[in-house]
Amino acid sequence: MTEWWRRAQWALTATASTNDTMYSYGMGILEVLAKIDLAGSEEKSLFDAVWEGSCTKMRDNEIRHLLEQLRGCARQEGGGPLIGHPSKQELSRPSPVKDPPVSGENRSSKEESNGYPRGNDPTRKEQAFATLRREILAARLKVVLDEQLNRGTSPTVKALARMKLPSIVR
């Protein structure tokens, strides 16, 4: 258990990094650690802070808004669904119908800003792909944690988690 905590500390520190590579490594390790039976539900639920800190906070409407902004960014640059992304299908918008309520789903509150959080405006292609990459990794962690902790996961979050990761642009 000591080694699990040591790795968890390293991974949590890495997910706080502004370096996309470090963030990716940290998220990957957290995903693996969440699957290991050494830790209980209390320890694993600490990892919720990581996906809760994502730009969309894994709210369905925020995810849809992010994907729409990414499409807009690609159109402004004259590209297809998303410039440099290999698959139109992988970036297709989650179902436009309202998702059924899922136990434990995060929803926007009236007090918070409507739409995509202002702190990370994806206006440039590189920033847009970096944001998408972080959101996909956060969604993957949320899906694993929800499975491990017997919580429901919205179809929109699951769809985001299944998307192919865009390359890290240097």
Image (cartoon, helix red, strand yellow):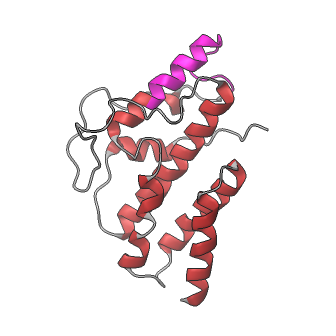
User: Is 164 situated above or below 30?
Assistant: above
- The residue that appears at 56% across and 69% down in the rendered structure is 32
Whether residue 80 is in magenta: the answer is yes
| Residue at horizontal 23 percent and vertical 32 percent from the top | 98
Visible in this render: residue 164? no
On screen, 40 above or below 20? below
Left or right: residue 31 compared with residue 145: right
| Quadrant of residue 146 within the rendered picture | bottom left
Image coords of residue 50 (percent x, y): 48, 58
**Residue 4's quadrant in the figure?**
bottom right
Q: In which quarter of the image is the C terminus?
A: top right
In the image, the segment drawn in magenta is 66-84
Front-most of 76 and 103? 76
Q: Does the magenta stretch include residue 124?
A: no
- Residue 22, how many percent across, how many down? 69, 57
Q: Is residue 123 left or right of residue 56?
A: right
Of residues 83 and 17, the one nearer the viewer is 17
Residue lying at 34% horizontally and 69% vertically, measured from the top left: 149
Looking at the picture, how far across and down is residue 139, in whole percent? Answer: 46, 50
How many numbered discs sit on the rendered protein? 0
Name, please, the residue furthest toward the right.
Answer: 170
